[in-house]
Image (cartoon, rainbow, N blue to C red):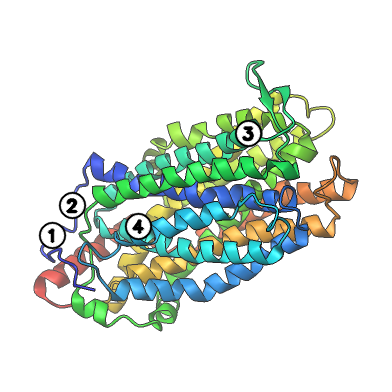
Amino acid sequence: MASNPQSSSTDEFAKLTWRERISYGAGDLAQNLIFGTIGSMLLFYLTTVYGISAAAGATIFLVVRWVNVFWDPWVGAVIDKHDFKSGKYRPYLVYAGVPLTIFSAMLFLPIDAVRGNIAYAFIAYLVTALTYSLVNIPYGALNASLTRDNDEVSTLTTVRMTEANIGNLLVYTFLPLFVQLASPDKQSKDIGFFGLHMNLGDYTSPKAGTAYFTVMAIYMVIGFAMLMFTYFGIHERVLPTKAESDNVKYSDLFAELKRNRPLLILGLFFLIGFTFMFFGNTVWPFYMQYSVGHSEWISSINLIGSIPGIFLVFLWPIVRKRIGKKQFFYIFLTLFIIGTLILYAWSLPAFKDSVALGYIGRFLQQWGITAATGYMWSLVPEVVSYGEYKSKKRVAGIINALMGLFFKIGLALGGIIPGYINAATHFDGTAKTQSAGALMGIQISMIWLPVILAVVAMFIMSRYPLSDNDVKKINLEIDQRKKAGNL
């Protein structure tokens, strides 16, 4: 690998062009299309169409995430230590993006020879998850390499989360609809959207495997195209010097956790936030299918829920400037709790046929969760800068590997715990209706645990130590050090 060709004289406080902001955000859209589909539908697919038990599905998630605990920090150290001719972080989008696209689609391979095979499901998911790290970690490090300007980072976060939530719209709203449209045993159903009827198939049937594979493969290809848009549209500016890169060690992982308190607190917030976010994503198909009893409404409800993450994201930097970063999270996490409780009320016998209640609850819930888990990414570059300030070593790859690890543990717990709760409450993926115990298990995963964890997340954010003024002072001092050659 050759040294990075970009000059250290590049303006590290650069104002980003709109092309660069949109290009970077396309990477979030891509990763939602490629890997978000897995987080949203894999457990549901494995325990219904694929035919393995809820416990087996949850165990696959558990083992793969434990492997990630050791794999991701190593990937972060490798990324920090090496460069390519075409950049430090960007090339991974190409080199790992191609196999990630293929492996993700192979998870849903619709042939009888692998259906119900736990070993195949485990290996396919493991390979996909390890490859995803080779895309996700360098992509996250790119966020801190574009500029040090805190206002630019805030704007960039707004743009990237808008695109990320467009990806969420395609995944959580249209993916179930497309799979049902492609599934067998079609019936005309009211999809809960102004009386519109569509011919929807049974996407819990073992015969729906081809439908899943076809839709997933199309999503993966579009996702890879978005990764290429990111690759060609951005410019790396804030990079470690060659001496800093040469000095990176795997042990920097433990050093950063020890000396970088903002990193530890933000990491815990990531873990808790994404745990209850993925609780909802994992359990939502189960909740709609069995607790509410209107799976045909899932796309229209999700369409309304996607509105805040696309059309109200522009409010994030405005709200943050007016009330501060901590209060921002308090407000939106409270909104998430209110929306979740409305969704609980919707499942009660007297209200479950009211599509309007579903619209309101999902809208408020998703407004809260997309704001809280979206805007937290804007804090990662300041945590990177704080680590650089303390150690005189910029390890954006390692820090993003750690943040990615917290994110993935949250993602895994969001799939593992509901899976084990389903198993403990005797959920039966072959049954059209579930027992009272199984319905209570779905309710615990969808409603009560996320509410409790949202309160815990508020407490964790209350301990975050960096103010905006602190971040500005840190970045200016680092810049002065570099200009003086005092690294």
- Of circles 3 and 4, the one toward us is 3
- In the image: residue 485, left or right of residue 82: left
Q: Amino acid at mark 1?
A: Thr
Which callout, 1 or 4, points at the residue further toward the start of the chain? 1
- In the image: residue 382, left or right of residue 288: left
Residue 176 location, x and y as percent? 62, 37
Q: Which residue is mark 2?
A: 14
Residue at point 70%, 36% (across, down): 343
Q: Which residue is mark 4?
A: 93
Which of the 4 image quadrants contains residue 160? top left
Q: Amino acid at mark 4?
A: Leu
Which of the 4 image quadrants contains residue 177? top right
- Of circles 4 and 2, the one toward us is 4
Residue 374 sits above or below residue 186 on the image: below
Q: Amino acid at mark 2?
A: Ala
Q: Which residue is mark 3?
A: 182
Q: Distance between the Cα atoms at labels 3 and 4?
A: 31 Å
Q: Amino acid at mark 3?
A: Ala
Which callout, 3 or 2, points at the residue further toward the start of the chain? 2
Residue at point 61%, 61% (across, down): 412
Residue 415 location, x and y as percent? 66, 57
Q: Distance between the Cα atoms at labels 1 and 4?
A: 23 Å
Q: Nearer the viewer, residue 212 or 404?
A: 212
- Which of the labelled discs sits on residue 10, or is there none? 1
